[in-house]
Image (tube, helix red, strand yellow):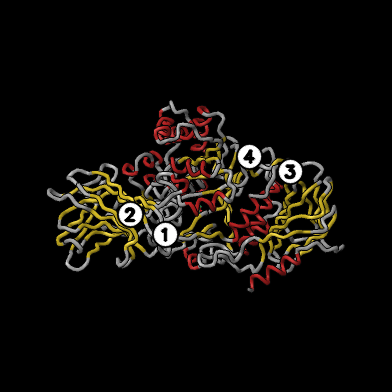
Amino acid sequence: MKRACLLAVALTLGATVPRAAAPAITIDASAPAGKVSPLLYGLMTEEINHSYDGGLYAELIRNRAFLDDAASPAHWTVVHGDGAAATMALDPGQPLNAAIATSLRLEVTQASAGHAAGVANDGYWGIPVKPNTRYRASFFAKTAPGVTGPITAAIESEDGTTTYARGRVSGLTQAWKQYDVALTTGALAPTAKARFVLTVDRPGTIWLGLVSLFPPTYRNQANGFRPDLLQMLIDMNPKFLRFPGGNYLEGDQIADRFEWKKTLGPLAERPGHMAPWSYRSSDGLGLHEFLLWAEDMNAEPVLAVYAGYSLKGAYVKPGPDLEPYIQDALDEIEYVMGPATSTWGARRAKAGHPAPFKLTYVEVGNEDFFDRSGSYDQRFAQFHAAIKARYPQLQVISTVGFEHPENQRVRSLTPEIVDEHYYRTVDAFLRARGQYDKYDRKGPKIFVGEWGAYETPFEPWNPRSRGEAPTPNLRAAIGDAAWMTEMERNADLVIMHCYAPLLVNVSPGARQWRPNLIGYDALRVYGSPSYHAIKLFATHLGDEILKAGTADTDVLVSVTRDSRSRRIYVKLVNPGSAAAPVRLDVTGAALRSTATALTLAGDPQATNAIDAPDRVVPQTSQVTGVASGFTYTVPANGIVVLMLETR
Ligand code: AHR
């Protein structure tokens, strides 16, 4: 009720009122001041906060390959009823194969019909169960002599008293073989308080490997994505996807980097790896899946290649030592965009995608200003030369932007594009107005590959920030929107940008960072106020920058136009706690008298949450009295996209 009142007040104030004294915003629509980069809004992603495992990647079994912990089968437990008994242990002596060099040995010492024993997996903070849904379970198994099964696969309640879906396989042998079981639920109330179990009803020894459970995925793609989460991303209209990181590209040590070749092919050939955000990655979402993900969103990949520096400071010396890494990057680029007749293009074709993916931008490393050895200048130059020699059409991005001292930047050549990262307080983003006006238009283009406002006293990487809500409040969204006006006004120079981090599993213990854009648990998903702000801006953009001058106002503004429809988008951000009337003086266009306002406003402390996903969401209203000079009142703590129609 409180929110509804606030919004009602805000929207009333948003009407046009003739107020001569209002500060002026002048908009020159006679000619564009520049072109909006067609890739301006995109997404940045990496494995952090269980973005993929326990997030976008739809696999439901946690520690499916039994490699998460060498000491014990984490997330697996023995289950048995009265009159049954079993034990389980990791068994590296019976590996599934060379890539997955262990298995789970299940010793059932006592079991009979109606008294089964086996193992259960608790999933990523539960197994989401939905009504009338078909799940695909699969696992590798082999048995001790004389044991043939059957094995029952089931999704059941956490306490085992309710079975939601069940299937069985039989005819097991002493050789590893993969078994598939379809599990279909009936009518039920959705719940994540569930587990996946594999049980037998007779004594014997069974080894299990790579146990998997998939719900329906986006477009039913095999090894695919959670549809609700992917839809949230598609709705943002992203034009590119920056992957695989972020720190995730580099790993803590060189051996922990994102080794894309180990993320290809059948899941049983992917060992996974230790990621820098404190948990192992299954690599089920590997290079090929990143590319499909971008394609599903109709977005271009922005491929970051490992550049010989890892987070804890180890680096590869430029020169001959770096050559294998450069070759690896060239192979990776070939996988993405090479013809199906090339070595790595053929691997892509074998994986089901003969057509090359579109690739324009390759980023060399991530945040290499952390490399205090000073080797980045030479490493970048070596990668740049090799990439350009083979793919002259590609644009190569340096990871050190102008926010860092000159001696940390690439100096031996001028990069075409530099990546700048800004994690700033709301106030710092408000003060950043005019930052890009000062940049040399003849210098490198800017990619703001990570940015986000925080509104708490804690920096995003400070562990104390984890006590705060996982996603930002409206005040942070105002900082974000202010920053977006700065980037939009300079969208000739800032050719791409993306908020980070994108995703967070809000379950206890799942996250390493705050704030994050989109929150979810096993069953539900929601967008933060910042999500709605970015979506509003990205889906109302156009292709021309119009010059907008401001005087005597704290309201931040950017103005763009769609050259085909001639619609003008005026973005207004009021960071103040009072409504702010502004006079809009538009020259060079004949305006229709009514316009549409999309508004995100209210209590700056308000935020959305998994149990309250819609506290702060955009409202649509009509604006009347629009003319070449008119006063519009921007609501307090408000973000507005004003759509002006022209005649
Ligand atoms: O977005 C979180 C982290 O912030 C990224 O992994 C890293 O590039 C940056 O420091």
**Mark toward the viewer: 4 or 2:** 2
Q: From this view, report whether residue 390 is shown above or below residue 550.
A: above
In the rendered image, residue 284, in percent from the top left (x then y), is placed at 39, 47
> Which label's residue is closer to the chain start, 4 or 2?
2
> Which label's residue is closer to the chain start, 4 or 1?
1
- What residue is pinned by disc 1? 131
- What residue is pinned by disc 2? 63
Marks 2 and 3, how far apart in space? 52 Å
Residue type at tag 1:
Pro
| Residue 332 appears in the picture as rendered | yes
Q: Quadrant of the N terminus?
A: bottom right
Q: Quadrant of residue 34?
A: top right
Q: Secondary structure at mark 1?
A: loop
The residue closer to the viewer here, 629 or 242, is 629
**Mark toward the viewer: 3 or 1:** 1
> Which label's residue is closer to the chain start, 2 or 1?
2
Residue type at tag 2:
Asn
- Left or right: residue 455 compared with residue 310: right
- What residue is pinned by disc 3? 565
Question: Quick check: is the Cβ at mark 1 less than 8 Å away from ligand 1?
Answer: no
Q: Which residue is depicted at the point 54% across and 62% down?
A: 471
